[in-house]
Amino acid sequence: MSATQKAKQAQAKPPPLTTQEIQQNYNRFQSELQGLASKIGELEQEAEEHGLVLATLDEALADEPGRKCFRLVGGVLVERTVKDVVPALQHNKENISKAISTLSEQYKVKEEELDTFKREYNIIPATAG
């Protein structure tokens, strides 16, 4: 057997993990998934809030586009008009939606990695009870 074949075999099989390392990796996967789910939830709530504000401002935009409104920018309230704020809010909402989509994809990938890990090490989560 050549040295390259041995190297390929060594790369193909990960070194065996101890029970403690398996537990740590499993907990790390669970923690990462929980963090991603939490962030997705926060962003979904933000997107919903943006939607409510946009619905209200759309009415004002139709009636009085020059109407004053205030926006928090970097911790400072800034006076703007409705016609200035609506496009910025729409842009922010689009960016939030893109971030949610990206995080959802990351969540799916991480979940697949966890499933593979569980299959590889025959992990069956204990049920509480």
Image (cartoon, grey):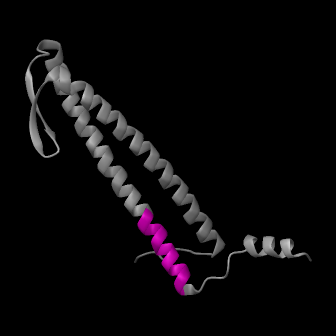
Q: Main structural element of the magenta stretch: helix, strand or loop? A: helix
In the rendered view of the protein, which quadrant contains the N terminus?
Answer: bottom right
Q: Identify the residue shown where x is 29% and y is 29%.
A: 90
Q: Residue 47 appears at what percent x and percent y?
A: 29, 39
In-front residue for pair 18/115: 18
Q: Identify the residue shown where x is 60% and y is 69%.
A: 117
Q: In this view, does 72 lie to the left or right of 7?
A: left
Up-down relation of residue 59 to residue 13 (above or below): above
Up-down relation of residue 89 to residue 1 (above or below): above
Q: Identify the residue shown where x is 27% and y is 38%.
A: 48
Q: Which residue lies furthest to the top in this view?
A: 63
In-front residue for pair 104/84: 84
Q: Identify the residue shown where x is 39% and y is 62%.
A: 34
Q: Which residue lies furthest to the front in this view?
A: 3
Residue 2 counted in the magenta span: no
Q: Residue 19 appears at what percent x and percent y?
A: 56, 86
Q: Report the magenta residues as a range.
A: 20-32
Q: Is residue 71 left or right of residue 25?
A: left
Q: Residue 43 appears at what percent x and percent y?
A: 32, 46
The quarter holding residue 70 reads top left
